[in-house]
Structure formats: structure tokens, C-alpha cells
Amino acid sequence: MTRFVKNPFGIRFKLVLMSSFLLVIPVLGYQYILEMEEYLRRGQEQIVLGTARALATALNERPELFDEGSYGPARESEDLYVYPVFNPLSLDDSTLVDWQDYQRYELSYGKDDAIGTELNPQSPFARYYHYDESLNFKLLAGEFNRSLYAYLKVVDDHVVYRSPDSLSIHRSDFLQISLMTREREFKRYVISPRGPEFLYAYEVGEDLSNIASLSHEERISGQWYEVPGGYEVELRLPLSMLGDKLGFAIYDVDDEEKRNVKSVVATSDVNAPDLLGSMRRPTPEIDRIVEGMGHNNSRIQVIDRAGRILLSVGDIQTATGLALTEQPEEQSSNKYWRYIEDKFLLPLYYQILTKPSNDFIDDLYAGGTAEGAHIDAALAGESMTQFRTIDNTQTRILEAAHPILDDGAILGAVVVDQNMNGIRTFRNQALETLFHTMLGVMLLISIGLFAFASRISSRIRNLRNQAENIIDDSGRLKSSIVASRSSDELGDLSRSFSDIVERLTQYTNYLENMSSRLSHELRTPVTVVRSSLENLGMVSQGKEAEVYIERAEEGIRRLNLILTNMSEATRLEQMLQTSEKENIDLAQVIGGCVEGYKLAYPESEIVTDITGPVRVAGVPEYIAQLMDKLIANAVEFSFDNKPITVSCHAAKDQAVVQVKNYGPYLPAEMKGRLFDSMISVRPQEKQKQPHLGIGLHIARLVTEFHQGTIRAENLTDEEGVAVTLTIPLLQP
Amino acid sequence: MARRIAIVEDEAAIRENYADVLRKQGYEVQTFSNRKEAMASFDLRLPNLAIIDIGLENEIDGGFTLCQALRSMSDTLPIIFLTARDNDFDTVSGLRMGADDYLTKDISLPHLSARIAALFRRQDVLDQPTSPENLLQRDKLTLDIGRLTVQWDGIPVPLTVTEFWMVHALVKFPGHVKSRQVLMQESKIFVDGSTITSHVKRIRKKFIQVDETFDCIETVYGMGYRWNTQPSASASEA
């Protein structure tokens, strides 16, 4: 029988493999969410562009807002220009580096700006006569974060500080700040340090020299530090202090003994409210308009034709476009789940997802001008959006620019920027949820499929085992299949198997009872023939006839013997059903039998090897009957002058009886079926007596009745056959 | 006056063959092919002996029914079952229903007539006193060869003719092993070994019913049986 190599991939494995097609679902989900993101991105693009367009429309046809004249670095004026600054400024770093490129907008004030004050009484024209090159300064004012920042680079050959014990502020180099508040109040402040130090500002009254009118103004802060050839002052005051006028003045004292103010250089006449220069914030009008747009999670910039940023509202780091409400932390949910999520799932997800960071620096806008393809396009008259990825942080920025037109001429552009982190975060959240769900569903489906497959394969295996057990080694039906009651295909298969086995059993029974039934049916006609012959014999017919009658009677006798043998097995089976076993010594029974055989077969040598007692539960008559058959067989197949060996002993929990004879080997094809009904291996010429192959069948019936086994094997040392019978020992 | 024998047998050839033989031996023979006919005749007049087949035409167990009816009519009427059924179950049922013998159709005609003669003789001598020369005494066992009856310790043991002859064969030479073949010849039946085994079993049972300690018939495995005069002789002698 060919045994196929067992397939290592069972149904279970295959089904689980099939279930891996489920992986398509998360991929589809992923694709879908990417599509969603793309859609949202386009939406955001439109919104951003829409914002830009709306703003640009509001600013259209208003050339005055972009009037070059109201806003220029080189203009001689008493007004102060306040530039928008886009990076934080530090006051305490003793340097002006952080002003960066803005320094190019600084304005110089020198002899032309000298004024006369109460401290250096002279006519406004005196400056032409009292020209002192030694004093001049450069000024730059900027606006950042609702505060006014300013620095003054003062060139002064003699820096004279307030003497440590001096209370008056006007007998040294000092800085005066004059301004008009929103309430149109004229205020003057003085900063008069005792050395390089943090600013300590005083508000002064009518008279600078009046110490009693001094009061500290803490809103003004900054630093005074020396540089070669002079000093620098960096200061800050909140815009809320300021109205629309502002002026700075540097008072210079050169003689440390006399401490008289020698000259004053100012941006405007800082002591006359009417003459005080205006503070020119570049785009208050635009500012208002843009403010009117409200904060919409974007950074909005208005640039002029040259690309200079006139105004910047909002902060690109927080301009996420989508306003995401922070989800409250679900602390109440299972902490194990959170642990798993944080430790295993999320790190896994972010192998493929990118997590954008708001912690980026937009280098491009660090300076005072903006550039980029979208701006170029807008200044050329086309609105445009573009995406820009900031390296190293994976943040994408959406930029939209729309031109501002005036009568066909381009005045500038509105640039609206948003970063894409909102959508990205939104996408990531969606994907997390998706992956969670998918993992759960797939786990569930996989477990379900596995269980299902296990059930199926176990049922199939069960069926297979049953099917294998139906027929024993010799091809005899020994059990039937329990028909499954389930209504599916496997149940069907089981039932049809059961049906087949049922019918096969019936057929086998029919075949096995065939001989018995045949003998029964034949007996009547045989009786007719025999009784007729006997009658014939009684009516004397003369010598000649008697010979024939005798031959016929001989034939009938043999026929009768055959019929008796044929039904022997059936009779035995019937008797076995009603027999009761008793405790016997098998060795004694076998010994007795062998004694009998020595008498019955005087021409054969029978050697015994019996060690007793061997106690088994059995019926001695049947065992004797079994031995009859075995010995008869052995004698018949034995070579001449070869002994027949009968052994009996107990081995472990089995009684072992063996009958060995030296004779021809068993034909190979008969090995398994030797003990079946109607099987005979006798060669035709040996058939002196009728043989139906019932003998060994009877031996098997008796063996089975004793719950034993019987088998016939060829001997290996010499040509011969050993029949071995084992019967379980009686437990003491 | 000739004895009348009734043969109830549905197979005409067998019936007539048997009838011919018996007629030649001087018996008056009535033949019936089914139970109804037989009962109609028996109601009028009982035969001296009845030979019955078990299966009668369409009645599978017609013979058994007939046997019961006959036995209810007469306690002493000898009844012989002559049938093709050779299994233990039918044999036991037949004998239990009061048949005097149960023969299979293998039996030869001379053997059959010998049995019939024996049964008649047993009936004849029932009233006559026992003649001492016909008695065979072995310990508690008494065999009356003339009457074909057996007594154990003075109590009669109801053996059939076949069983009687078997016991007789064993007892003739106590201690000698009689093979199944010999027993078969002695009891004038022709069956296989296992039938002899069941006959011996039945004989033992009948004796045990009389005496619970009976164990005179010893089985010599592989050879046959022997009669032990000394009870409980060790089996290891075999």
C-alpha cells in the first residue's frame, strides 16, 4: 500500500493563510484615508486661496495703502518709522545681532538734527554754528508682539554717566523719549544711567532739573551698554503706551567737571508737543482690514511689489488650518489597553506614519522679505498655491498668494500660509482608529477561522480514523461508523460512509453465512439421494449393482462430511455466544491436547515446551478445538521427519502459545487473510480430504472469543511457519 | 399386530424412502406432509411412534408444535425429531419439548431403524421385571441395557437413546479414553466433534441434576472422554 507523504499544510493552515487576504482591508482603509487627506488638502487649499482672495479684494483699489511715499527708509523727516519685525528680539544680550537685516533700515541723526533746549539754550539755527561732529546716532524702531522695540547707536567721544551720588538726571549723557499717548497726553521720559546697566526710566514733569517731579516708569525696559566710540541703547515699550507721536533725543555732556549739556540731537523737537514727530507704523490701515478678517488659523502676510512684508498676522506654528479640539485623555479606559497601545501599537504604526512637529522654524520668512514661486506668480498677476516641505521636520506648509490690484496694476500680494499638521494629525488619528479596528477584526476573524478550521479538520480526522478502523489488517469489517447527525457535507459524508459500511457488513455476513446456509439447503437433497441409495441397497440387485451403490454411498458420505464442516463455524459461533469462561490452566489444557495428538498422529514427532501454570479465563473445549485445527494444519504442512514444536508460557500479561512446523512458507499474498473463512492455501494435489479453509477461521473465532490475537509468520532460521496465539492472562 | 409409525415430513422423496424401509421391516407406516393432516389423524388415533421433521411446509417450527401436542396426548409415546437442523439450539429445544431423540438427516437408514427398534424395546420392557444379566453396575451407576435406562444412586436419569449409548460406551471400560469418533460410532450417529461435545455436556447436566457432586465424565483434551470410577481423579493424569 502506498503511503503518501503527509502534507504539512493542513486545512487549518490553509484557511489561516486564506485569511491573510483580509490584510487587503487595512490597505484599502489606508488608501481611503489617504484619499480623504488629499480631499481635505484640496479643501484647505481652496480655503486658503479663498482667504487670500478675499483679503486681496478688500485691499484692491486702495493704492494709498501701498504708497511708496509714506513708507521708505531714506526719507528725511521728523517722523519715525516703525518696522514690523518677525523674529523675537532680545534686550539683554548686549548686541544688536538679533535685529539682523532690519538694521539696513536704520536712520542716522547728526548735526542737522541738533536742537536747542532749556539745558543748552540756543536758537534753532545755532546748530549751524555750534557744529559738533562728536555726537550723532543711528536709530531703528520696530514692532514685534505688540511692543515697540528700538535701538540707538550713539557715537560720543566722551561718555559721561551720572555720578553715583547724584539725584539729578540732567547732568550726564541721557536719553529722552517723548510721546503722545492715545489720550493725546504729552509725556516725557528720561533714561540717565550711572553706567552700562539695564534701563531705569523716569517720567519727568515740566522741568527736567526738578528732581521732585521724577517718577519711575517700569513699562520701559532695555539695556544701555558701551561700544567702542560710544554706546548703544536697546529698549522696549508696549504699544499701549503710545499714541501717534514719538521722538527720541540724546543729550550729550562732555565735561565731567562742569556737567553741562553741550549738545542735543533729536528725531524731532522732543519738548514741544506740537512739533513732536509722528510715529509711522507702516500699515495701520491694512492691519485693520486684516484684523477684520479675524483669526482663521492662518498666517496672513501682505507684501508690496518688492516683496517686502508690510504686515504679518498669525504664527505659522499654530496656523494648522483645521481647528482641532484636543480630545480629553481617556484615563478611565483600561490602563492595560493604554499600555499596549503606547508600547506596541503606536510605535508600530509610526513606522509607516509620519508625525509632524509644530516645532519648526520657517527660515524663509526670517528676513523682511518674502519670496517663492507663489509670490512671484502673484506679483505677476496670477494667484497660486504651493506646498513646501520644511526639511528635517516633515512639516508641509501650504502657501497661497493672490495679487492686489489697482486699476490693472499690481500693488502687492496677500500671502496666506497654513501648515498641514492639522490634516496630518487628523489623518493619523483616523489611521490609528482604523488600525486598531482592523487589528481587532482581523484577530477575531483569524481566531474564528482557526477555530472553524480546527473543528472541520478534527471532524475529518475523526471520520478518517473511524474509516481506518472499520477494517482490520486482514480486511475484515470489525466496527461500523457512527453516523454523524450534523446536516452539513461532512455529516453527509459520515452518513454515506456509515451506510456503505452497513451494506458491506450485510454482504460480508451473507458471505460468511453462505457455507452454513448452503450446507443446510444441500442437506435435504443429499438425504433424498442417500436414503434412496440405501433403499436400493436393501433391494438386492446383484453383485454388480452393489459396487456402484457402495461407490455412490461413499460419495454421499464425503459430501456429508463437507456439509458438516461447512456449518461447523456457524455452529461454533452460536455456541460461543452462550458459553461462559472459567478459570483454567492453559498449560495443562495444551499439555493434555498434545498427549492426544501424539496418539492421533503417531507418524509425526511433536515436541513440547510448556511452562505452567498459565492461568487464563477460557473454555477448555474450544481451546482444544483451536489446537486441533492448528496441529492438523501443522502436521499436514510439515516436511517429513521434522518435529512440530508446541510451546506455551506466560510473558508479561499475555499467555503465549506457539505451534511451529518446518514446511513450505506461507504464500505472501495470503498472509493477512489466512484466518478468514473459506481461505485455503493448500496446493491442489494435497487435497486428499475435502478442505474448505474453515479450520483457521475457527481458530480465529475461538481466539477472538478469548480476547486474544493469532498470527502466522514465516520462520527465519529455516523454512517453516509459526502460528502464535496470545491470550490475556487472568489478573490474580 | 404391527406397530404403527407416523412420519411427518414435507419432502416427499425422503418421506417415502423412510416409509419404504420401515414397511419392509414390518411396521405399519402413516405418512403426512404437514401438521394439519397429521393432527387430524392423531386426533382419531395415536401412532405407536412418531418421526417428525421440524420445518413443515410453510411452518418453520411446525414440528415443535406437533411434538408438544402429541406429548400432551400421551406421556409415553416415543417421538423422534429427524431434521436437517443440526444446531445446538434446536437440539436442546427439541429434547426439552419431550422428544425421545433428536436425529439429523445424516443418519443412515440402518441406524435409524436401530433407534426405532431400541425405543420400542424400551417401551416393551418397561412393565417387565429387570433381568439381572442386562444390568451393568459401576459404583452408584446402574445401566439397564435391556430397557435402555440409567439410574444413579437408585434415581433414574432421563437419557435419550443416543445419550444412553454414549454413556454405555464410556462405562463399558472405565478409565479408557473414548475418542469422539468412537462415541459417534457407538451411539450410531454421524455428526462433528462439537456436537459430541454438546451431547456430553447435556449428559453431565442430567447427572448433575440428580447428584450435584457428579464428575465421573472427564474430558481428555485433544483425545476424548473417559469414565472415572474414582471421583475427582486428578486431571493432571492426562
Image (spheres, coloured by chain):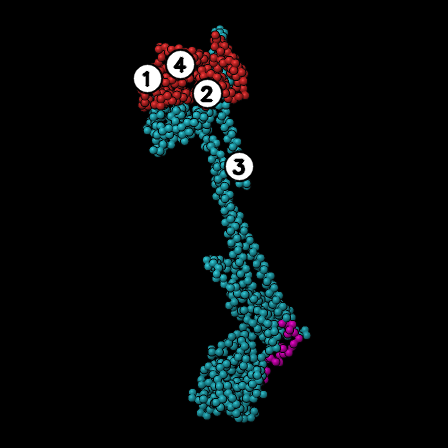
Is residue A568 in sight in this rendering?
no
Q: Are marks 2 and 3 on the same chain?
A: no
**A23 or A203, which lies in front?**
A203
The magenta segment is A55-79
**Foreground label between 2 and 4:** 2
**Foreground label between 1 and 2:** 2
Of the image marks 2 and 4, the number of the one nearer the N terminus? 2
Q: Which residue is mark 4?
A: B148
Q: Give me the residue at 47% from left, 41% from top.
A: A6
Of the image marks 1 and 4, the number of the one nearer the N terminus? 1
Q: Give me the residue at 55% from left, 61% from top.
A: A427
Separation of marks 1 and 4 at Cα, in angstroms: 18 Å
Q: Which residue is mark 3?
A: A495
Separation of marks 1 and 2 at Cα, in angstroms: 31 Å
**Number of numbered markers:** 4
Of the image marks 1 and 2, the number of the one nearer the N terminus? 2
**Foreground label between 2 and 3:** 2
Q: Which residue is mark 1?
A: B139
